[in-house]
C-alpha cells in the first residue's frame, strides 16, 4: 500500500441526526478511500463495520456530528464526534442489548443495543468521551496487520 509516515486526515464528513436517507454514506466513503489506498481487506471490513455503527449512533441518538478518517504509518483512526444528548452511563451503554432507541427507530430495524459492543469488537483501541447534553466523541483505532508493515 501507499507508504504513509505523517498522520494525514483523509476525510471529514458531516453526519446529520435523524437523516436516515443519507445514513451509511460516511462509512461507505471511508471504505472506498481505504480501498483506494490498498489497505488490507480484512482491516477495511472491521473499519467499515465500526464506522457504520458509530455513524448510525449519530443519526439515531445525536443532533449532528462528523466522521473523521485519519491514517498514519501504524494504522487507521476513525473519529465520530457529535453534538447531542451524550451518554449518561457509558458502562450500561456498552452492554449488549442496552438501547434507548424509540419505537419508531426500532421499527426501522435499529435499536438492538449491538452497535457499541460491535465497535468494541472491531477496534484495536476504543476511547469514548461523552458529556450529557453536550455530545460524544468516539475514537476508534485500527492497526495495520504486521505482515504488511
Ligand atoms: N452518539 C451517541 N449519543 C448519545 N447516546 C448514544 C450515542 N451512541 C450510543 N448512545 C447510547 O448508547 C446506547 C447503546 O448504543 P448501541 O449503539 O450499542 O445500541 P443502539 O444504537 O441503541 O442499537 P443498535 O446499534 O443495535 O441499532 C444507545 O441506545 C444510546 O442510549
Ligand atoms: Mg447503535
Image: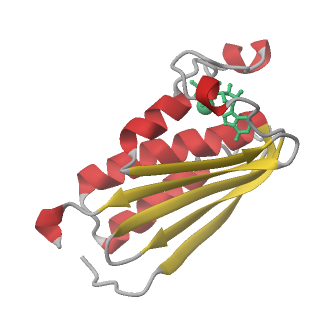
Residue 37 at x, y percent in the picture:
34, 73
Extreme right residue here? 133
Q: Nearer the viewer, residue 77 or 19?
A: 77
Residue 131 at x, y percent in the picture:
79, 45
Residue 20 appears anywhere in the view: no
91 on left or right of 32: right
Instruction: Name the residue rendered at 72%, 46% in the picture.
Output: 130
What is the quadrant of the C terminus in the image? Answer: bottom left
16 shown above or below 11: above
Q: Nearer the viewer, residue 77 or 59?
A: 77
82 shown above or below 13: above
Q: Hey, which quadrant is residue 13 in on the image?
A: bottom right
Q: Which quarter of the rendered image does ligand 2 occupy?
A: top right
Instruction: Name the residue rendered at 73%, 20% in the picture.
Output: 100
62 shown above or below 40: above
25 on left or right of 105: left
Q: Nearer the viewer, residue 133 or 68?
A: 133
Residue 72 appears anywhere in the view: yes
Instruction: Name the residue rendered at 85%, 48% in the picture.
Output: 134
What is the quadrant of the N terminus in the image? Answer: bottom left
Instruction: Name the residue rendered at 40%, 65% in the picture.
Output: 76
Q: Hey, which quadrant is residue 93 in on the image?
A: top right
Number of numbered discs on residues: 0
119 shown above or below 33: above
Q: Hey, which quadrant is residue 73 in on the image?
A: bottom left
116 on left or right of 107: left
Residue 16 at x, y percent in the picture:
78, 49
- Colour scheme employed for the rendering of this structure: secondary structure
Residue 69 at x, y percent in the picture:
53, 66
26 on left or right of 2: right
Amino acid at each position: 500500500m501507499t507508504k504513509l509516515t505523517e498522520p494525514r486526515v483523509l476525510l471529514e464528513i458531516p453526519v446529520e441526526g435523524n437523516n436516515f436517507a443519507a445514513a451509511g454514506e460516511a462509512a461507505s466513503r471511508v471504505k472506498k478511500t481505504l480501498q483506494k489506498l490498498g489497505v488490507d481487506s480484512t482491516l477495511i471490513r472491521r473499519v467499515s463495520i465500526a464506522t457504520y455503527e458509530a455513524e448510525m449512533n449519530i443519526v439515531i441518538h445525536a443532533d449532528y456530528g462528523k466522521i473523521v478518517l485519519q491514517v498514519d504509518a501504524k494504522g487507521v483512526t476513525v473519529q465520530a464526534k457529535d453534538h447531542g444528548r451524550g451518554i449518561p452511563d457509558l458502562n450500561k451503554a456498552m452492554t449488549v442489548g442496552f438501547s434507548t432507541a424509540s419505537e419508531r427507530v426500532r421499527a426501522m430495524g435499529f435499536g438492538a443495543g449491538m452497535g457499541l459492543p460491535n465497535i468494541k469488537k472491531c477496534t484495536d483501541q476504543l476511547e469514548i468521551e461523552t458529556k450529557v447534553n453536550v455530545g460524544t466523541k468516539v475514537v476508534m483505532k485500527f492497526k495495520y496487520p504486521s505482515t504488511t508493515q
